[in-house]
């Protein structure tokens, strides 16, 4: 299944999935695959590699980011991308070479990050696959991408990236399966939106696919959400949820659907079906893609129906009644940072490691995108800290703000402002202790 930078099951280039071929025969392997290299004026790297094995253990799926960096000081305008693949253990790979439009500009001395996926394994009709050991016996797959365009002097440019994939490559992830029994369904009232605020982790599976794809949703009080796809994250997108007829109406670009809240045995789930239109081949009529989503809450539940909306909103905020005891905030937190810089919104997944000593707290932070630095705070009231955030990479910057915590220290949130790499920054964050 293809995934890209604009939402669940949305292909970046519709080039990312290799056909599943019966593993017989042999082919010549041209070139030497690698995870970084140079091609003309561009240095490239393959990062954030994740691996998912199908539940029947016959196929594998890799997600990753291809990073292209311009190194000689001249911008490049790309126009097309060509994808091909080959393996030492098969004579047939997918549908051969595929050429697609790819109109992206790589500025001088800058980089662009492109999410891709590939899947590879035994064909479903291959009776021999299980006998031969399933995914454990799949031959390595090499995928080649050729980006073509021109530089600032109109000279033709071709950038070649080769990715070699096998079962030893990437972080192996076992996401929440989209099948299986759920606890009883709950009917949401129109003022129950606060009950789903927080972080939810799970997966989605497209109709006809073999793979459960890991996703994480951060749902806000206004019903908007930010989602991260794959592990490590290669794809981020935003959408909205609204209560309608006792369920959640899901909207994300062209995709719409319905999610139901399920609750029982101390656990909460959101599950349902979503569909949208996809243009898989340029110029061809779009096709409909549907998929199933299942998410499990990793945030404390807020009171549900029967509690008025004002009380629910108050319950969603950290309690000001008591101050945490020393060492309450010691630990590692994971969450989302979101802000605005030069009029443009951005989001990132952040990890924060803190140590509290009395009224002082300090620690380090980093984002999946590569930013990092330190953080320090002073307790100035019940569950409230004055905050200083220093950034060391990709540029040096300092920010000030405030942070609050839940009474047991398991949830953090705050805002800060300052001047970042490209100008003034206004940022908020939420995080949950792991």
Image (spheres, rainbow, N blue to C red):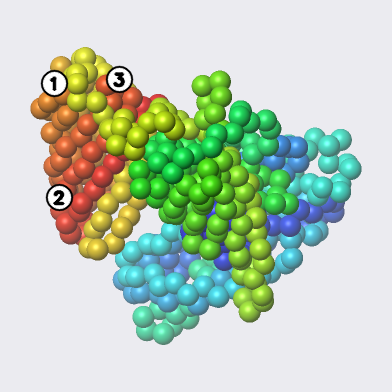
- Residue 2 seen by the camera: no
Q: Position of residue 315 (x, y in %)?
A: 31, 30
Q: Position of residue 337 (x, y in %)?
A: 31, 44
- Residue 94 seen by the camera: yes
Q: Which residue is mark 1?
A: 359
The answer to which quarter of the image holds residue 51 is top right
N-terminal label among 2 and 3: 3
Residue appearing at x 34%, y 38% in the figure: 309
Q: Which residue is mark 3?
A: 408
N-terminal label among 1 and 2: 1
Secondary element at image label 2:
strand
**Going by the image, does 136 lie left or right of 46?**
right
Outermost residue to the right? 127
Q: Is residue 197 above or below residue 347?
A: above
Foreground pick, 19 / 89? 19
Secondary element at image label 1:
loop
Residue appearing at x 13%, y 33% in the figure: 386
Tag shown at residue 236: none
N-terminal label among 3 and 1: 1
Residue appearing at x 48%, y 75% in the figure: 103
Q: Which residue is mark 2?
A: 418
Label 3 to label 1, Cα distance in Å?
A: 15 Å
């Amino acid at each position: 299944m293809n995934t890209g930078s604009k939402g669940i099951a949305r292909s970046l280039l519709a080039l990312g999935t290799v056909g599943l071929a019966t593993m017989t025969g042999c082919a010549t392997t041209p070139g030497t695959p690698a995870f970084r290299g140079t091609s003309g004026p561009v240095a490239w790297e393959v990062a954030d590699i994740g691996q998912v094995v199908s539940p029947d253990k016959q196929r594998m799926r890799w997600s990753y980011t291809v990073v292209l960096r311009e190194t000689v000081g001249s911008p490049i305008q790309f126009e097309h991308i060509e994808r091909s693949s080959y393996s030492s253990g098969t004579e047939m790979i997918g549908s051969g070479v595929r050429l697609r439009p790819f109109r992206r500009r790589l500025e001088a001395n800058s980089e662009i990050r492109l999410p891709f996926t590939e899947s590879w394994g035994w064909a479903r009709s291959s009776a021999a696959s299980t006998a031969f050991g399933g995914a454990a016996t799949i031959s390595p797959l090499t995928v080649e991408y050729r980006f073509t365009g021109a530089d600032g002097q109109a000279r033709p440019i071709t950038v070649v990236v080769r990715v070699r994939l096998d079962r030893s490559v990437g972080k192996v992830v076992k996401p929440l399966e989209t099948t299986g029994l759920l606890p009883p369904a709950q009917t949401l009232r129109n003022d129950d939106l606060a009950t789903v605020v927080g972080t939810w982790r799970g997966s989605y599976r497209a109709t006809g696919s073999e793979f459960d794809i890991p996703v994480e949703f951060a749902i806000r009080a206004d019903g908007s959400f930010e989602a991260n796809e794959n592990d490590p994250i290669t794809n981020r997108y935003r959408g909205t949820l609204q209560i309608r007829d006792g369920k959640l109406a899901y909207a994300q670009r062209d995709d719409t659907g319905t999610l139901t809240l399920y609750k029982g045995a101390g656990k909460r789930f959101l599950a349902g079906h979503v569909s949208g239109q996809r243009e898989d081949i340029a110029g061809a009529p779009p096709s409909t893609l549907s998929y199933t989503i299942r998410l499990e809450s990793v945030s404390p539940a807020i009171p549900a129906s029967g509690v008025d909306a004002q009380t629910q909103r108050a319950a969603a905020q950290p309690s000001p009644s008591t101050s945490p005891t020393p060492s309450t905030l010691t630990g590692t937190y994971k969450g989302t940072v979101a802000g605005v810089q030069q009029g443009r919104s951005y989001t990132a997944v952040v990890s924060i490691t803190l140590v509290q000593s009395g009224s002082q707290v300090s620690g380090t932070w980093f984002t999946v995108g590569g930013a990092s630095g330190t953080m320090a705070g002073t307790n100035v009231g019940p569950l409230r800290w004055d905050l200083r955030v220093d950034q060391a990479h990709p540029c040096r910057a300092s920010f000030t703000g405030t942070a609050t915590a839940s009474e047991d220290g398991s949830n953090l949130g705050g805002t800060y402002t300052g001047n970042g790499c490209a100008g003034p920054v206004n940022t908020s964050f939420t995080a949950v202790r792991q």
